[in-house]
Image: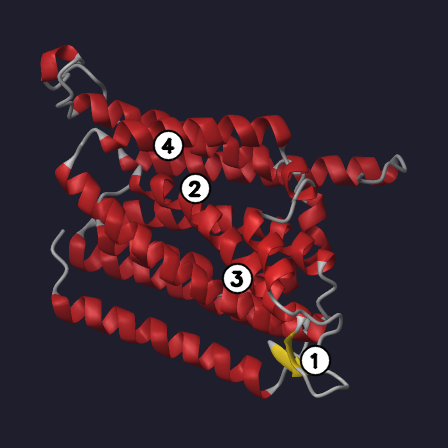
């Protein structure tokens, strides 16, 4: 797949324009989006992603369109799972609802920057060292096992990392918010940071951890850096509105982490199979390719991802509805 420099430039400019529009909306009128506003934006971004995939199909063929859709669905689902942690952070730091949009917007920009760096590094590694697939695959399987064991409890077990604890000690942080500002002045005229800075640090470091999961996952579905980048862009754009749209529905997606565990485990196994097929590690098959290793086509990967996530969502809603009828509440 050859993507011209012009196509890359147009794509990057479009991303900057979309971010600028979002920042303008958040900056001019801080508010909690209504269900109608949130659903309109989410639907618009999903439509854009579907249309973009159709354009990839038209110009580059069905294979690359399938890789984009599979990558986008996987990244989008991981982003939804990440919202659980965002909810915990917002609650833990008591961020006022009308200012949560700004926090999420900054988080999305940080995530795009971090993932862009990871994508560039990942693409460079893969082009030079096929054996990195073994590491990516093993990491995804390890992550999948962790998700399957702990499920949504991982969000409940959220703890402040060392950078947040250091920031609390080293920086002068006031007790109260001052709108969405990062700094304020106390009654004595001293300049100090607001708790919003700590929230930004929490979101930023969480984005870094999320990138460690998501980038190896999508490289298991496509090696094309352009598709990896655009799939991540479409997965993150609209995440701010999706946060408000889903609201309490997040608590009802009790099997989402289990579904994602299956997806990540599958991609991890696929990565290792691809690594064995293209093997150049001396102590495996004498450094030769393993010609009998089966190849998993993208249509099968896409079917497994859609089927698993749909099953997890439907099973979650059925369980929560049954629990509600029986008077059982979520812990």
Q: Is residue 288 left or right of residue 233?
A: left
Mark 1: secondary structure: loop
CA separation in Å, label 2 and label 3: 17 Å
CA separation in Å, label 1 and label 4: 45 Å
* Sequence order check, earlier mark of 4 and 3: 3
The residue that appears at 21% across and 21% down in the rendered structure is 276
The residue wearing badge 1 is 178
The residue wearing badge 2 is 213
In the figure, residue 168 lies in which quadrant? Answer: bottom right
Q: Nearer the viewer, mark 2 or mark 4?
A: 2
Mark 3: secondary structure: helix
The residue that appears at 21% across and 17% down in the rendered structure is 293
The residue wearing badge 4 is 267
* Sequence order check, earlier mark of 2 and 3: 2
Asked whether the residues under the numbered discs 1 and 4 touch, taking CB atoms below 8 Å apart as contact, a structural biologist would say no
**Mark 3 packing: few (<14 Cα in 10 Å), some, or many (20+)?**
many
Q: Is residue 70 left or right of residue 173?
A: left
Q: Nearer the viewer, residue 290 or 284?
A: 284
The residue wearing badge 3 is 239
Q: Nearer the viewer, mark 2 or mark 3?
A: 2
Asked whether the residues under the numbered discs 2 and 4 touch, taking CB atoms below 8 Å apart as contact, a structural biologist would say no
């Amino acid at each position: 797949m050859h993507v011209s420099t012009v196509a890359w430039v147009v794509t990057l400019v479009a991303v900057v324009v979309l971010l600028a529009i979002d920042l303008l909306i958040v900056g001019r009128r801080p508010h909690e989006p209504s269900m109608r506003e949130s659903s309109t934006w989410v639907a618009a971004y999903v439509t854009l992603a579907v249309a973009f995939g159709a354009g990839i199909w038209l110009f580059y063929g069905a294979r690359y369109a399938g890789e984009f859709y599979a990558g986008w669905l996987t990244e989008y689902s991981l982003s939804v799972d990440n919202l659980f942690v965002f909810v915990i952070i917002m609650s833990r730091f008591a961020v006022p609802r009308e200012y949560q949009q700004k926090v999420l917007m900054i988080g999305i920009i940080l995530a795009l920057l971090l993932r862009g760096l990871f994508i560039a590094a990942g693409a460079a590694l893969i082009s030079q060292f096929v054996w990195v697939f073994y590491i990516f695959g093993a990491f995804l399987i390890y992550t999948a096992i962790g998700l399957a064991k702990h499920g949504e409890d991982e969000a409940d077990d959220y703890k402040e990392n060392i950078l947040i604890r250091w920031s609390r000690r080293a920086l002068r942080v006031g007790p109260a918010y001052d709108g969405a500002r990062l700094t304020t002045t106390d009654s004595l005229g001293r300049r100090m940071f607001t708790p919003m800075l700590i929230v930004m640090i929490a979101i930023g470091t969480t984005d870094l951890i999320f990138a460690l999961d998501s980038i190896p996952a999508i490289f298991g579905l496509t090696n094309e850096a352009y598709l990896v980048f655009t799939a991540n862009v479409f997965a993150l754009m609209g995440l701010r509105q999706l946060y408000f749209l889903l609201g309490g529905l997040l608590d009802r997606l009790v099997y989402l982490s289990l579904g994602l565990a299956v997806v990540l485990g599958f991609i991890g196994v696929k990565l290792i199979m691809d690594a064995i097929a293209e093997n150049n590690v001396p102590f495996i098959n004498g450094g030769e390719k393993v010609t009998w290793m089966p190849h998993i086509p993208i249509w099968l990967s896409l079917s497994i991802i859609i089927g698993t996530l749909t099953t997890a969502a439907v099973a979650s809603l059925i369980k929560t509805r049954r629990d509600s009828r029986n008077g059982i509440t979520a812990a």
